[in-house]
Image (tube, rainbow, N blue to C red):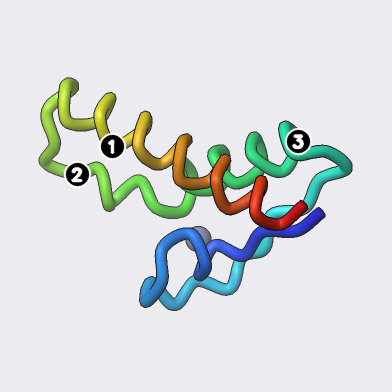
Amino acid sequence: MQLACDSVVPGLGCEYVATGHSADATHAAMTAHGGDAHANLMEGKTDAEMMEMKTQMDAHIRQLIDQHD
Ligand SMILES: [Zn+2]
């Protein structure tokens, strides 16, 4: 199972592709990548905004993976 970073955040120009044997593993890989490579997207946000963004991103990634099935 694969999920391209560019399909999660179109226009970012990132070539990373998360891979995993299950939806959960792919989701975890993409979430970890986002925290590592795109931490700058969170810059200047409050804790509440970060939590909100993380929640939305988690749901968004989950949806993309589910469509993939
Ligand atoms: Zn990326």
CB atoms of marks 1 and 2 within 8 Å: no
Q: Is residue 69 left or right of residue 49?
A: right
Answer yes or no: do the residues labelled 3 and 2 have beta carbons within 8 Å?
Answer: no
* Amino acid type assigned to the residue bearing label 3 in the image: Ala
Q: Residues within 10 Å of mark 2 (few under 14, many from 20)?
A: few
Q: How many angstroms separate mark 3 from mark 1 (CA)?
A: 20 Å
The earlier-in-sequence mark between 3 and 2 is 3
Circle on res. 62: none
> Badge 3, how many Cα within 10 Å: few under 14, some, many 20+?
some
Residue at the spot 64% in from the left edge and 35% down from the top edge? 28
User: What secondary structure is marked by label 2?
Assistant: loop
Q: Secondary structure at mark 1?
A: helix
| Mark 3 and mark 2: Cα distance apart in space | 26 Å
Query: Looking at the picture, how far across and down is residue 2, in whole percent?
Result: 75, 58
Task: Using the image, determine if residue 47 lies above or below residue 41.
Answer: above
Element class at badge 3: helix
Q: Which residue is mark 1?
A: 53
| Picture coordinates of residue 9, whole percent (x, y) | 41, 63
**Residue assigned mark 3:** 25
Q: Label 1, label 2: how many angstroms apart (C-alpha)?
A: 12 Å
Q: Residue placed at 69% from the left, 54% from the top?
A: 18
Depicted 10 relative to depicted 43: above or below:
below
Q: Earlier in the sequence, mark 1 or mark 2?
A: 2
Question: Can you give x and y, in whole percent of width and height, for residue 20 in the image?
Answer: 81, 45
Viewer-nearest of discs 1 and 2: 1
Q: Are marks 3 and 1 in contact (CB under 8 Å)?
A: no
Q: Which residue is mark 2?
A: 43
